[in-house]
Image (cartoon, coloured by chain):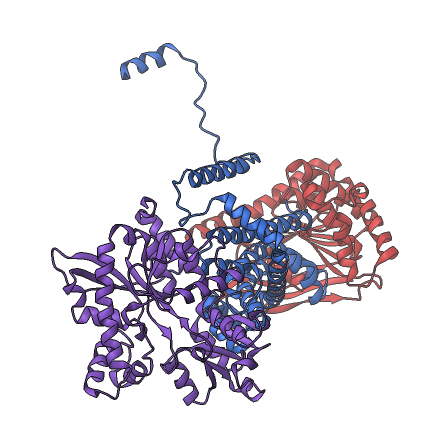
Chain colours: A blue, B red, C purple
Amino acid sequence: MSDNSLTRSETTATQPVPYRGGGFSPKRARWVAPVVFVILITIWEGGARLGWISPIILPAPSEALNALIDLYNSGDLIRHLSASLQRLVGGWFFGTLLGVAFGVAAGLFTLARAGIVPLVAAIFPIPKIALLPLFIIWFGIGEESKIATILFGTFFPTVIAVYGGVDNVDRGLIRMGQSFNLSWWSIVRKIILPGALPAMLSGFRISASIAIILLVAAEMIGAEYGIGAYILLAGNLMAMDQLVAGVTILSLMGLTVSWIIGRLEKILLRWRV
Amino acid sequence: MDLHLDHISHNYDGTAVLSDIHLDIPKGQIVCIIGPSGCGKSTLLRFIGGLEKPTEGQVLQVGNPPEDSLNPLTYIFQDFALLPWRTVSGNVSLVLEDHGIKGNAADAIIKDVLARTKLSDFADALPKQLSGGMKQRVAIARALAVRPACLLMDEPLSALDSQTRELLMDDLVDLWVRENYTAVYVTHNLNEAVRLGHKVVVLSRRPGKIREIVEIDIPLQDRQAHEHLLSEKQAHLWELMREEAMAADQELAHV
Amino acid sequence: MKRFNMNLFTRRFVLGAAAGAATLMGVVGASAAADKVTIGALRFTSHSPSFIAVEKGYFKEEGLDVELKFFQAAQPIAVAIASGDIDFGVTALSGGFYNLADKGALKVIGGLMSEKKGAPGNTIIVSNKAYDEGVKTPADLKGRSWAMTQQGSSFHYMAGLISEANGFTVKDMQLKPLQKVGAMIGALKSGQVDGMAIVPHIASALARGGAVKVIGKIQDMTDYQVTTIFTSTKNTEERKDVVQRFLKAYSRGIADYLAVMQDQEKDPAATEAMVDLIHKYVYTDRPREKAAPSIKAGAVYLNEGAALDVKDVERQLKWFQSQKLAPASLTVDKMVDASFVETLK
């Protein structure tokens, strides 16, 4: 073998250099996701029809779809969705508003940073579900405790994202602002906030997902309607088709939010290289 | 308005950075400051513009800035410092907004400074669409918009390739010939210093002291015609700098 | 029925999906020839017959090698029986149970706790605030809020019983699912909900503390087969003999329990001995002096011989179906195998 290669390299003096580049740059391939999705669903449906997958373990996708259609026809889908969306939007909006305020404060002021950052680090990892009994005492079993759960869940990641974003704004731009005698408020409004916007938007992406995750927890308490309540009920009733249908709705909500934020990024961050 | 640097010294965490800098910056002149890296020349520029305070001494304004000057001491940065989310005209308007100049008045100024920096066609472009030279011209336009009494330029051409640098140097010369602006120009490039400086201040290695002030009395617009005179000046400057640069280099290796 | 033989992964999936219940194992007895049987149990006094039959060796005498597996909630027991992990369980009939039964996995084989006039039974309590506002009888609960663990739970059904006995429907009550009994009590004490039903010893303890008011009992309204004994369909078909022996031993446990606990004054020494036995399994985190009153007060009525009130089971199923909490295709015949015990009425 080695003899052979030796003689060949001596006799053939010219050859193309071996190519060692390439790879490490995944491209977009729009058709892959739907194909994977269709194959998985087909295997799942087929397995259920042929009896390989017991209905106790997992309902067939068609059963879940039927549950979804039933839900729509009964008119409850709209009730569940509107109840959940109100909680999501309310909780997320106020959590984000407070999170941005505290995050910007922590990014700008020494005292605020010293006060807020350790507090956030201490409270962020606490599962909000564990605080649910406390929320019931503080906010009752009405909408307040549900909104509070989502609010708390979205507040902390927003603070962290915004504070990090403000911290990472190019100091050179701030110095430029000062050198042109821009007022403090102008520097914050025209330089720091737009500069922190990319970090804020990716923070929103995370906080919106957390809000959806917390929906089920929030609707554990005294919720008659809501996607989370619907999923909980399905679990209690061992109605796996409804469970899968409910989880699918959550996942669709997640996809929608991700799409909206993707559009926002395209529009608001046009300037990014 | 002239500027007067009155015995400026500076320590940073116990390390002396600048020592007893005494210098006049007369109206209508470009003063170049050169020196080996780490000699404190950029720090000195930040003192002049009031972005930092020296430990000792002070920077004095002699006489009042012109009435119409919005921002007497105006910087031009090495990295351009343009807001990437604003267009070319938006970046210029940024520095006018805080002075209450909006609408037609702002548009007129923006149009004027963009014309003066040959950017009229790019008013609506975003910084990411511009080349490095154009970005620095936007920064210059922005500086001109506030009618500065003195331009403070911190290695404005260092981030550019050499062809662009030549073109921009010509632009700065043209602009000076037309407007006679005052400027402090920090650079480590000797060629820039002899092309643009009426006075070239050579700083020693850290702690930076004024080693020599070289006056070049050839008018800016004629300098390219006196190639050999310039090379002599440049060679002289290099002699002054060489030792310092070598010593500074050694020093860094010790740190 | 081969399809319920799941591998380890899928069992975990089902258990985890159901409740993530933690189980504790207590292995009791071991004779070589005995049939191995696993019972899913909760640490409630109403599960005492299991403990008595284990402690007194009734199962062993029937040739059963019994292992008790403890759960945190009833529903995971039903799931574990459906998946074949355990053999017998006791549960209230709930929405989850009906759905599992509809898949053909489970069969009710006997009755246990019943509402019987005069015996301790589920008690209706209301918040002090609601009481002051005039909620003084179960009929006053119309238009009021009602705490329950979940939709389709026995607490939900009891709201249905109250409303039907008093001429309104459960839709006239505002149902508040709060997941846990602790949360229900908390919400009631703080006046965030108006009423709920709860086992007698908890109700009396709360009322004694002045936190709530007792306004009635479920047993005053109707008979109610609260809990039933159930096993897998596979056991009723392939291990009939084991099921019979299990129920025989279990009935002896019930008989012992009734004899002592329904008239606790009759033989105080026997009562104390019974409390000692039960305390090995229930309220183990409290000292005996503190556990004893709760164990005594919680001596609910259990059906002799594990007899089953099939009529009431059918009534419950109908109600759950009317509320769309049980599948319409489920019938009593599909869910109940009444061949092992006596049926009531």
Q: Is residue B187 visible?
A: no
For the point 80% across and 47% down, the residue is B114
Residue closer to the observer: A96 or B98: A96
Residue closer to the observer: A52 or B235: A52
Q: Is residue A34 left or right of residue B219?
A: left
Q: Is residue B50 visible?
A: yes
The residue furthest top is A11
Residue closer to the observer: B101 or C289: C289
Q: Provide residue C139's location: percent of width, then percent of height.
A: 55, 80
Quarter of the image containing the C terminus of chain C?
bottom left
Dividing the picture into quarters, in which one does residue A5 lie? top left
Residue closer to the observer: B143 or C265: C265
Dividing the picture into quarters, in which one does residue C206 lie? bottom left
Image position of B214 with respect to C147: above or below: above
Q: Provide residue A249's location: percent of width, then percent of height.
A: 56, 52
Q: Provide residue B85's location: percent of width, then percent of height.
A: 69, 51
Q: Provide residue B108's location: percent of width, then percent of height.
A: 87, 52
- Figure label count: 0
For the point 32% across and 55% down, the residue is C232
The residue furthest left is C32
Dividing the picture into quarters, in which one does residue C236 lie? bottom left
Q: Is residue C120 left or right of residue B95?
A: left
